[in-house]
Amino acid sequence: SRDYLFKVLVIGNGHVGKTSLVHRYVNEKFNKNYKITVGVDFALKVLAWSDTETVRLQLWDIAGQERFTSMTRIYYKEASGCIIMFDVTDACSFRNVRSWKEDLDSKATLPGGNPLPCILLANKCDLSPWDVPLSSIEQFSKVNGFIGWMDTSVKDNKNISESINFLVERMMTV
Ligand code: GDP
């Protein structure tokens, strides 16, 4: 049997749904006090991946991280993968995805130097109208080195475990 431990960063503009995502996905072993201490939400989810494989996912929400700049190094240290989230009704949050990705790639790489596997989540897809065209997201995801993108709704629980499982599959094969 094999045991995997992956540290996954959850980044993106404020108010796009990062904290909601972590709370939705992880409903055990969540320590709220940690956030107060170091300025990141850190949560653990254990997945029985197969008969012989267990996956432990550490999800690190960047919440408030910009106010704790001394924590940046710890935040990015030994990360295995990343979720970058934006809000489909907030074009500004989409425009900022590029700088979030550049920031990520400048601060964290895999041991061999390759970029971390990173998935793009177009959140709040339950809302309308969208402020970001679907074709732009598709194109942007391809050009900027994402492993893929999915429309998600943390509110409706749409594509949450699906998107995280997709990222886990990639992290298991790098
Ligand atoms: P964060 O700042 O990125 O951590 O964003 P939050 O998780 O605090 O979410 C910001 C707001 O968006 C909250 O009021 C959430 O309830 C709301 N929200 C999060 N995800 C969704 C979603 O998928 N659909 C809708 N309609 N609202 C959402």
Image (tube, rainbow, N blue to C red):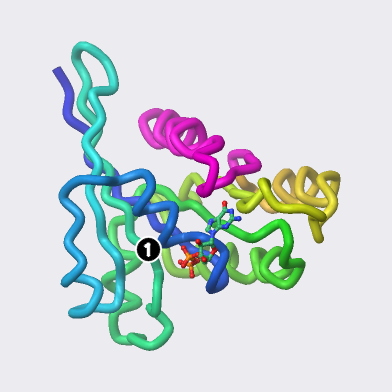
Q: Residues within 10 Å of mark 1 (few under 14, many from 20)?
A: many
> In the displayed structure, would residue 107 be above or below residue 145?
below
Q: Position of residue 113 (x, y in %)?
A: 44, 53
Magenta extent:
147-174
Q: From this viewpoint, which residue is outermost toward the top?
A: 51
Disc 1 marks which amino acid? Asp
Element type where label 1 sits in the image: strand
Quadrant of the drawing holding the N terminus: top left
Residue at horizontal 49%, vertical 45%? Answer: 117
> Is residue 100 shown left or right of residue 75?
right
Residue at horizontal 25%, vertical 73%? Answer: 35
- Camera-side residue of 79 and 16: 16
Query: How many labels, in total?
Result: 1
Q: Position of residue 50 (x, y in %)?
A: 27, 15
> In the displayed structure, would residue 76 be above or below residue 8?
below
The answer to if 165 sits in the magenta stretch is yes
Residue at horizontal 17%, vertical 61%? Answer: 31
- Camera-side residue of 116 and 53: 53
Residue position for label 1: 61
Residue at horizontal 50%, vertical 39%? Answer: 157
Quadrant of the drawing holding the C terminus: top left
Q: Position of residue 21 (x, y in %)?
A: 44, 52
The answer to if 158 sits in the magenta stretch is yes
Tell me: is circle 1 under 8 Å from ligand 1: yes
Q: Position of residue 125 (x, y in %)?
A: 67, 47
> Is residue 123 shown left or right of residue 27?
right
- Camera-side residue of 25 and 173: 25
> Is residue 12 shown left or right of residue 46?
right
Quadrant of residue 159 within the rendered picture: top right
